[in-house]
Image (cartoon, rainbow, N blue to C red):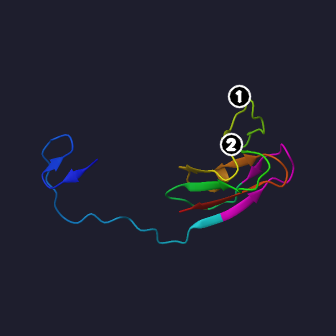
Amino acid sequence: MHLEQGVVNDGLPVTVSGVLTPDLISTAPITGQAIISSTGVAVQLSSGTLTNGVIITAFSNNTAPIVIGGSGVTNTINGSGNGYILEAGASVSMAVDNPSRIYINGTSGDFISFCGS
């Protein structure tokens, strides 16, 4: 929403007072990598407390897409699978409170990196 003193973008009056300050994160970001050790076997991301979610990036030289989901995520990429397909080099953000809620599946040797706060 665009906000100016006295007017919001839809024309309704508004009063602005004080100073808006962002909440800063007082802890280091949570970062890590996870590798598919066996094709078709889901791998859980490491644990940590998040406030703003996590960004997951598939390594650009992966041989196949990574599939992201819950503990039962499969490596099925044909329209009947149960996960989010992440192509090599692509990224996705997810609003989770802990990276360990996320599992990846794919081809042995392919991996992701992640960063959250």
Are the residues flagged by discs 2 and 1 in contact, CB closer than 8 Å? no
What is the magenta range?
A: 32-44
Please tell me whether residue 105 is drawn above or below residue 56 in the rendered image: above
Q: Which quarter of the picture shows residue 59?
A: bottom right
Q: Quick one: 43 or 77, which is closer to the camera?
A: 77
Please tell me whether residue 38 is drawn above or below residue 21 in the rendered image: above
Query: Which residue occupies 81% across, 53% down?
Result: 36
Separation (CA) of disc 2 from disc 1: 17 Å
Q: What element carries label 1?
A: loop
Q: Which amino acid does label 2 sit on?
A: Gly
The spot of residue 26 in percent (x, y) is 47, 72
Q: Which quarter of the picture shows residue 34?
A: bottom right
The spot of residue 20 in percent (x, y) is 27, 63
Q: Does the magenta stretch include residue 45?
A: no
Residue bearing mark 1: 79
Q: Is residue 35 magenta?
A: yes
- Is residue 105 in view? yes
